[in-house]
Amino acid sequence: MSRREFIIQEIAVNGRKIKRVVVDDHVDKHKDITDDLILDLVRLLDGIEQLPDDISSPYEYYVTLLGIQDKQYKVVWLLEDDELYIGIVTVYRDDRRK
């Protein structure tokens, strides 16, 4: 597969208005992670203000634990300078307790 793009209802992430989600094909190796689940997790980022875990210009990388449907997921995502999309690098189930 290849990268996939989705248009979503606008959310605010680190003060940026985001309407587009780009999902990296790396996510495809996790068969239990669907596009619908990814988009639901992205919606949970609405209103978040988070410092990046790493910066490699023009990208800022973030790692966030999010819970949905009584399950916890680790979401690795990025923001690109001067762009209004959120990039999903990978998502996987994290079985550690919250």
Image: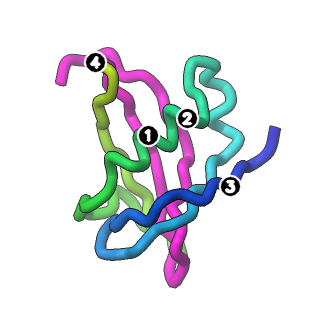
Q: In the image, what residue type sits under mark 1?
A: Asp
| Residue 16: x %, y % from top left | 38, 75
Q: Is residue 89 magenta?
A: yes
Dots 2, 1 in contact, CB < 8 A: yes
In whole angstroms, how far apart are the C-alphas of marks 2 and 4?
16 Å
Q: Is residue 88 magenta?
A: yes
- For label 4, the SS is loop
Residue 5 has which mark? 3
**Residue sitting at x 47%, y 27%:** 92
Q: In the image, what residue type sits under mark 3?
A: Glu
In whole angstroms, how far apart are the C-alphas of marks 3 and 1?
14 Å
Q: Quadrant of residue 67?
A: top left
Task: Name the residue tied to disc 2.
Answer: 36
- For label 1, the SS is helix
**Residue sitting at x 39%, y 49%:** 43
Task: Please identify the dominant SS of the magenta region.
Answer: strand
Residue 40 has which mark? 1
Would residue 84 appear left or right of 28 to someone viewing this image?
left
The residue carrying pointer 4 sits among few (fewer than 14), some (14 to 19) or many (20 or more) residues within 10 Å by Cα, namely few
Total marks in image = 4
| Residue 2: x %, y % from top left | 79, 45
Residue 70 has which mark? 4
**Quadrant assignment for the N terminus:** top right
